[in-house]
Amino acid sequence: GAVVSQHPSRVICKSGTSVKIECRSLDFQATTMFWYRQFPKQSLMLMATSNEGSKATYEQGVEKDKFLINHASLTLSTLTVTSAHPEDSSFYICSARDPSAGRNSPLHFGNGTRLTVT
Amino acid sequence: GQQLNQSPQSMFIQEGEDVSMNCTSSSIFNTWLWYKQDPGEGPVLLIALYKAGELTSNGRLTAQFGITRKDSFLNISASIPSDVGIYFCAGPTGNQFYFGTGTSLTVIP
């Protein structure tokens, strides 16, 4: 089945620094990937849609200058949290669909990245 | 973004009992997905539903796509300790997927 790999699984950084999270589709090409954020005991909230070769589409209320998304190839999307602050601490999860599996193919998720900003 | 409402919010059941949870939306969906999330991990797909009225099983799990296209149900039969986790429904709007509020399941051995 479709596999999505995310790295790193955990990261601790100091306030003011930037952190990059990678999301790779391992056995399929993904023109679109999705980035979610999840706070403890809450649901997944869509942050942005990453589009290969073009600008990402951000959900309302998500700062595009703070959460930089780059989708440089058909198998890699990156999310960079810039000038991180403690309130950015969260669980970030990427996902993608295998387009060859059909128009209604489901999302497959990476294992998430636990970001802690001190 | 859209949000799907799930109930119950949490469940505490004895091992061996059956479980039922549902998901409702104010919007119509053409696809319903059910995922399970273990602590510290990404969600894993359990069942995908593509047609109104569809009833699909995956082992002890059974899910149904509501006729109105605004709801879906997930049932787990004969629960076991490894069923513990958070269950999410999800539905697409255009090219994007939105998730339900989640149902936390605890199975007591």
Image (cartoon, coloured by chain):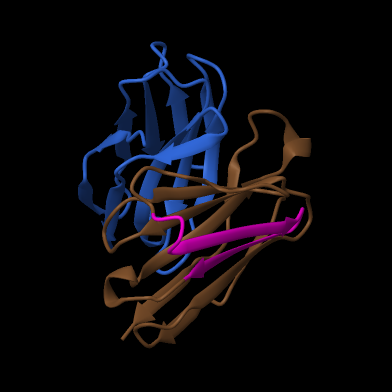
Indicate the position of residue B27 as horizontal and vertical percent values.
36, 20
Q: Is residue A49 left or right of residue A24?
A: left
Number of on-image labels: 0
Q: What is the quadrant of residue B82 in the picture?
A: bottom left
* Most distant residue in the top direction: B68
Q: Colour of chain A?
A: brown
Indicate the position of residue B7 as horizontal and vertical percent values.
24, 37
B47 part of magenta stretch: no
Q: What is the quadrant of residue B3 in the picture?
A: top left
Residue at 45% of width from left, 54% of height from top? A36
Nearer to us in this view, B81 or A2: A2
A68 part of magenta stretch: yes
Q: Which chain is blue?
A: B
Indicate the position of residue A6 as horizontal and vertical percent values.
60, 67
Residue at 43% of width from left, 83% of height from top? A17
Q: Which residues are magenta?
A: A63-81
Against A14, residue B42 (above or below) is above
For the C terminus of chain A, the quadrant is: bottom left
Residue at 39% of width from left, 26% of height from top? B72
Q: What is the quadrant of residue B109 in the picture?
A: bottom left
Main secondary structure type of the part rendered in magenta: strand
Q: Is residue A16 left or right of residue A110?
A: left
Against A30, residue B93 (above or below) is above
Nearer to us in this view, B62 or A23: A23
Against B64, residue A71 (above or below) is below
Against B79, residue B72 (above or below) is above
Q: Is residue B59 left or right of residue B29?
A: right
Nearer to us in this view, B61 or A54: A54
Residue at 21% of width from left, 45% of height from top? B9
Indicate the position of residue A74 as horizontal and vertical percent values.
77, 53
- Regarding residue B71, the answer to whether it shows in the image is yes
